[in-house]
Image (cartoon, rainbow, N blue to C red):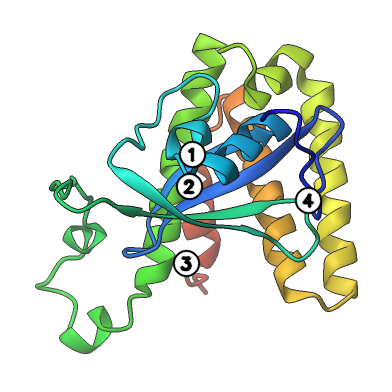
Amino acid sequence: MTDVLIHNVNFDERGLIPAIVQDAGTLEVVAFAYLDNARLAKTLQTGETRFLVDLQGSADLSEYRLLDVRANSDGGSLTVLIERQAGEATERETVSLMQQFDKATHSASEVALVDVASMEFGLTLHKLYSLIAERKETRPEGSYTTYLFNSGLDKILKKIAEESGEVIIAAKNRAPREIISELADLFYHLLVLMVERDVKLGEVANELTRRAAPKKS
């Protein structure tokens, strides 16, 4: 079963391909993993979600069933759609960023302008940063993140340079799906760099806030 060759996908030099695992009902990103040919083949042939869990095994997808596996336009990444099985509905803890707004100083119209998708993106970055930081500490065998940290800063910087170039090429080719895919790769490697150099997401956010503040005359 594991010797089946998957076509129309581009595995990297380590034989891995990034996969974003997404709840089809809520659009929540449930997991981010790098799959090899064997685990991808098992997923497609069995329809089981357990093969989607990265080798260090932190994500729990036992309550989900597989809906679809889609190769993005360049074949360099995957989007995996899953859904919660009947009878497995559980209440998931969420974080509301709306609580950060002072209702006494913001009108209803101002709050309505909040981009919920942008909030979800921020939460996703936070979760991914935390996962990367955990893998730096535990160094699980077979993890691409472990490979980057073990290879050192120069390798991480090289990957950022490569991913930046791929973003530029996708933009020049006016290929929206490719841009999205390459940006996702770039964001991931930037987060790896931040963890490696102990730069917190909040520190970058504070710097952006400082720059966006009105200049005093």
| Depth order, front residue of 181/137 | 181
The reply to whether callout 1 and callout 2 are in contact (CB within 8 Å) is yes
Q: Name the residue carrying label 3.
A: 213
Q: CA gap, disc 3 to disc 4?
A: 44 Å
Counting from the top left corner in percent of width and height, residue 38 is at: 68, 30
Does residue 67 lie above or below 204 as drawn? below
Q: CA gap, disc 4 to disc 2?
A: 25 Å
Question: Residue drawn 47% across and 59% down?
Answer: 209
The reply to whether callout 3 and callout 4 are in contact (CB within 8 Å) is no
Q: Name the residue carrying label 1.
A: 128
Mark nearer the viewer, 2 or 3: 2
Counting from the top left corner in percent of width and height, residue 144 is at: 67, 26
Residue 115's quadrant in the figure? bottom left
Question: Residue drawn 81% across and 48% down?
Answer: 163
Q: Name the residue carrying label 4.
A: 9
Side (left or right) of 130 relative to 191: left
| Depth order, front residue of 176/213 | 176
Mark nearer the viewer, 3 or 4: 4
Side (left or right) of 63 relative to 182: left
The reply to whether callout 1 and callout 3 are in contact (CB within 8 Å) is no
Query: Which dot marks residue 191?
Result: none
Q: Secondary structure at mark 3?
A: loop
Examine the rendering and report whether any part of residue 150 can be seen.
Answer: yes
Q: Secondary structure at mark 4?
A: loop
Residue 174's quadrant in the figure? bottom right
Q: Upstream in the sequence, badge 3 or badge 4?
A: 4
Q: Name the residue carrying label 2.
A: 125
